[in-house]
Amino acid sequence: MGSHTGRQLLSLCELVGLDAGDCAGYARALTDALGPVVRRSLDLPPAAPTFLSDDHTPVEFSLSFSPGAAAPSLRVLFEPSSGFGTLAESSRLGLRALHGLAQRWGISTEQLDLVQDLFLPDDPRGSFALWITLELTAGGTPRMKAYLNPAAAGPDRAGATVREALDRLGHHRAYDSLPPADRLLLFALDLGDWAAPRLKVYTAHHRLRASAVGALDRMAGGPSPAETEAFLYTAAGLPAGHDGVFDRRPVLACHSFTDPAADRPSGFTLHVPVRDYAHHDREVLDRAEKLLPRYGIAPDVLRDALGALTPRRLEDGVGLIAYLAMVHQQGHDPRLTAYLSSEAYRVRPPNERPTGPRPVL
Ligand code: TRP
């Protein structure tokens, strides 16, 4: 497994123009933090049914495109010590891996330390304990993000857990500014040296109506409902003027908080699970190639990135692009992110048509 994901990481690193020394260092760090699973044969089934990716590879890549940037920023999301022992054991080992990475690069884990007991208790519940993202910047020191499970103390406690975490981190009015949601999916922390570190809450919206998507945004100065709708319609291949229900996989929103004094989020991201609303990856890429130029971004790097991940034809599967996301953050131009699957274990065959959101009459 390690050589598969390592090779993909190196190809993407090279594609976004990182130098070879930085790339090699990042690949080594990923291998170390993944743990014993790197030596596991891909002929065996996945070590754990992680929901980090659809085929249970404990690694997912993403490219975030900002207008004007020479290259997208490359990130890698992974489950440290994936599949090792019980959830409690993998939580402990995962935390140890995170501290190892933090030490390696002098990244402070202070924010995480303050809420660790809420999300990483001795007897964690749910489907995962800890994920890490490294944003692979030039210079060899990445930025780090930790992803935690709001349901770690039980799904019925998710709201209280997130409220308490936001409170402890000084964001006393944040929780009440979140939109109504079916599920709190992830709680994320930017760790270390960020200009404005964010706390992020991911909300899942089941059976969302396309025409209602504008209401999910609570950001001060966020996108207009028309912009959010236009992004969703294009990403889902829904013709303008038609409404539809996203009933195969929920649309996600992410609300980010940077200013403890604020009463609203300073950022809003809409994550569209394109793999459940398209026939195959060629169709998804076509949609991304429509969206990127709207935001002032050239689409060629995304196309090349898919080629760097896999030699397969885009028509032969779906899910290589798992999500397309529109990201708004105060003080920055809007950007677009594509989440890219490793497909170490499996290529999902094309979906049967019709693939769009269920029509509303
Ligand atoms: N695979 C999970 C999902 O689809 C979690 C996840 C992985 C995710 N990458 C993501 C969620 C990017 C949002 C955005 O929900």
Image (spheres, rainbow, N blue to C red):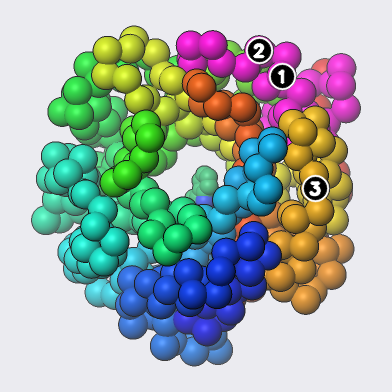
Q: Is residue 85 left or right of residue 114?
A: right
Residue under circle 2?
224
- Select label 1 or label 3 by which is in front: 3
Front residue of 104 and 234: 104
Whether label 2 touches label 1, CB < 8 Å: yes
Label 3 secondary element: loop
The total of numbered circles placed on residues is 3
How many residues crowd mark 1 within 10 Å: few (<14), some (14–19), many (20+)? few
Residue under circle 3?
299
Residue 183: image x %, image y %? 42, 33
Quadrant position of residue 240: top right
| Above/below status of 45 relative to 164 | below
Q: CA distance from mark 2 to mark 3?
A: 24 Å
- Select label 2 or label 3 by which is in front: 3
Label 2 secondary element: loop
Q: Is residue 216 left or right of residue 158?
A: right
| Above/below status of 25 relative to 181 | below
Residue 323 seen anywhere in this rendered image of the structure: no
Front residue of 86 and 77: 77
Residue under circle 1?
227
Q: Is residue 231 magenta?
A: yes
Extent of the magenta region: 218-246
Q: CA distance from mark 2 to mark 1?
A: 5 Å
Front residue of 53 and 221: 221
Residue 61 seen anywhere in this rendered image of the structure: yes
Q: Is residue 126 magenta?
A: no
Three-letter code for the amino acid on which mark 1 is drawn: Glu
Image point (37%, 25%), residue name: 257
Image point (26%, 66%), residue name: 104
